[in-house]
Amino acid sequence: MGFVDSAIAILSKYLPRHHLMLAGILGLGLVVLMVLATEEAAHGARFSLPPPLTALPHEELATHPETDSAAATSDATGEFWTQMEVESGDNLSAIFTKVGLNAQDMYKVLNSTEEAQVLNKLYPGYQLSFYIPEPGTLTQMKVLKSPLDGYVFTLNNDNYVVEAIKRTAEIVPTFKEGVINDSLFMAGQRADIPTVSIMEMADIFGGVIDFILDPRQGDSFSILYEEKYLDGEFIGNGEIIAAQFTNQGKQYIAVRYENETGDVGYFNPEGESMRKAFLRTPLDVFRISSNFNLNRKHPILNTIRAHKGTDYAAPKGTPVRATADGVVTWAARNGSFGKLVVIQHNGQFETKYAHLDDYGQSIKKGARVKQGQVIGFVGTTGGSTGPHLHYEFVLNGVHKDPRTVLDQMPKAISIDPSEMQRFRSQTRELLVKFLNHHDDSRLLSLNGSGVSEQHH
Ligand SMILES: [Zn+2]
């Protein structure tokens, strides 16, 4: 398990609803580490946005006056500069020793300014540069938390002064599309879509599509997402701007929208939130994708009639997520259910998760859980012949097919009517371009123009 996975796991405990978004954010932060090498080549068709969206603020606000120290100091590369990337297990004094400085030098920087505390919280991937024109004299030190964010410490009258480095990446909207032959994961790979983005797409549509049961061969999808560049160099992927998934002939469309107060969400073209009270599936499709093949005859034992539940075949240990916010009313063995978790939601609804191998962290009777939170792990306890999740959805004490019930649920929170005009003006033209892009690119490739085209 890599650092990204653990970091996502930790963060998702606090913000389970947004863990995929966080994956995206982390992906940006850690992109230098992990993503760059593998995804640098994967640039698809570029896509220009209508004016309102190009103006969307993606700039981080500098806490200090903006400086261009990064450019200034990187010009000064020479024999006196030592650069290094922080690796897992590194510590500051070892790093200082490595570049020929002693503890005194280290404390001098550390005690110089409040910002120097960044040195006490080094993470793998941080870039450190030392300018040491004569042995033992650290004239300048640069700490980059990401290519966009860091500090420069400069020796001035026997003390260090600090300047913040805040740079803004150039955002290049990138269009990709895929068709499902086997799994969403494989389709994403074939289309050169960053894994983080395809996970984020599954998260965006998680309230309307059960990505375990619903996808069929021939389903198609397209996404428009941000690629970030700095000085012309690809530095990572940003957020999804719009996404479309056609499942069994039914098209779902989502567009990112930031309201005037800065809240960001995904909405359908009518302004209805994509965030629903219930997730369609209690399993994370990406945790089982490697073992999951839609071409196989019966990957899922979908036997709602037989025993009032849905059985999801999945490898032992696959995380099971709460499909909605609620309170745990049972987390213990229960006869043929084996290890069972029951969650009460909002008075009328109850969900049950059976045959678990184990319970999620701090999942016990009375615990509050958030949608998407891991409440257990797939197993084969109780009356079960192989690893699978038995999932029940109960409304007012009566077992229901969640798919039918959720289709009948009242509409999710929508854009306020007073804001609809703003929403429309920011999304309509974008969506038209996005949804027509497929035909456009076909036309262009027929004319031999290749894949990389610009829209105007
Ligand atoms: Zn079952």
Image: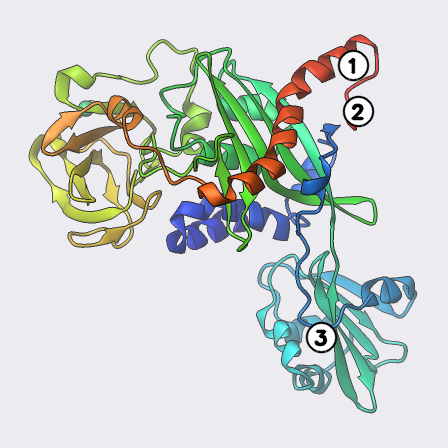
Residue 403 visible in image = yes
Left or right of 265, for residue 299:
left
Do tag 3 and tag 2 residues touch (Cβ < 8 Å)? Answer: no
Residue 217 in picture, x, y percent from top left:
47, 11
Residue 269 vs residue 38: left or right? Answer: left
Q: Which mark is residue 96?
A: 3
The kind of secondary structure element at disc 2 is loop
Residue type, numbered disc 3: Phe
Instruction: Tell me the CA gap for discs 1 and 3.
Output: 55 Å
At horizontal 29% and vertical 41% (from top left) the residue drawn is: 324
Q: Locate residue 13, reporting x and y percent.
A: 38, 53
> Which element is circle 1 on?
helix
Instruction: Provide residue 372's location: percent of width, then percent of height.
Output: 35, 42
Instruction: Tell me whether circle 1 and circle 2 mark residues in contact (CB < 8 Å).
Output: yes
Give the foreground label among 3 and 2: 2
Q: Earlier in the sequence, mark 1 or mark 3?
A: 3
Give percent across and percent down for residue 284: 39, 34
Q: Residue at x 12, y 41 (%)?
A: 333
Residue 143 makes an appearance in the image: no
> What residue sits right under mark 2 in the picture?
453
